[in-house]
Image (cartoon, grey):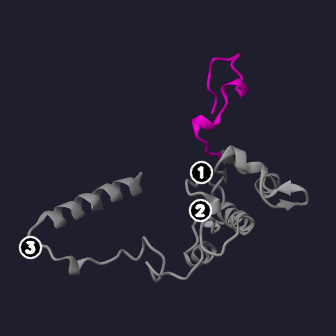
Amino acid sequence: MLRIIKYIYFSVICLILTSKNSYSQSTLQIDTLQYPKGYPNSLLSVSQQLHSYPLPRYFSSHNLQRLFNWMDPNYMGGQGQPNIKTNTAIINAAKIQEELITTWYYGIVITNSGTAFTGPLNKGCPMNIDLANKYPNVSLDVTTLWTQVRPKKLDTSTKMLLF
């Protein structure tokens, strides 16, 4: 919530500053806490960036809900980037997700319910599923588009949508 308030606050400040006639764009500075070192030409991978940040400090007995990663893990693994093959991106994504699970207190994300069963296998099991089996106490989060869900496959006996 605090992050949203900060975003709105700084957006309003930027709007006010840019609306003044005497404003000079040369005075703008990048907030180095919001971007990786070297932005916009950072040579660090997502994994390297994660390892360069200070670790979170949770009490050992906390009961916080795990964080939800809205960023596509396959994209974070390099999917769509030059010279990165899909299988390489999936392997990288699994490593990044494991880092997010063990260090940053995130849940396991399957970004598209159909992609959970594709890609390289680890001991005969897709990497997302293998990760979920390895960490059974970690929440499993799925993002999907409603247009991808076939109504015939849904259980309509309850007339209720369960999340």
Q: How crowded is mark 1: few (under 14 residues within 10 Å), some or many (20 or more)?
A: few
Establish if 58 lies above or below 117: below
Q: Name the residue under label 2.
A: 58
The residue located at (72%, 63%) in the rendering is: 90
Point out residue 86 in the picture as x, y percentages from the top left corner: 70, 64
Queried whether the magenta region covers residue 146, the answer comes back as yes
Which residue, as the protein is rendered here, is positioned at the far right? 123
Name the element at disc 1: loop
Point out residue 46 in the picture as x, y percentages from the top left corner: 59, 72
Residue type at tag 3: Ser
Establish if 162 lies above or below 117: above
Queried whether the magenta region covers residue 46, the answer comes back as no
| Separation of residues labelled 1 and 3 (CA atoms) | 47 Å
Point out residue 21 in the picture as x, y percentages from the top left corner: 8, 69
Q: Name the residue under label 1.
A: 64
Closer to the chain start, of discs 1 and 3, is 3
The residue located at (65%, 63%) in the rendering is: 100
Whether tag 1 and tag 3 are in contact, CB under 8 A, the answer is no
Closer to the chain start, of discs 2 and 1, is 2
Residue type at tag 2: Tyr
Tell me: 98 left or right of 106.
Answer: right
The residue located at (68%, 62%) in the rendering is: 97
The residue located at (79%, 52%) in the rendering is: 129
Q: Mark 3 points at which residue?
A: 22
Name the element at disc 2: loop
- Start-end of magenta stretch: 142-163
Q: Quadrant of residue 10?
A: bottom left
Whether tag 2 and tag 1 are in contact, CB under 8 A, the answer is yes
Closer to the chain start, of discs 3 and 2, is 3
Which SS type dominates the magenta stretch?
loop
Residue in front for this viewpoint, 3 or 153: 153
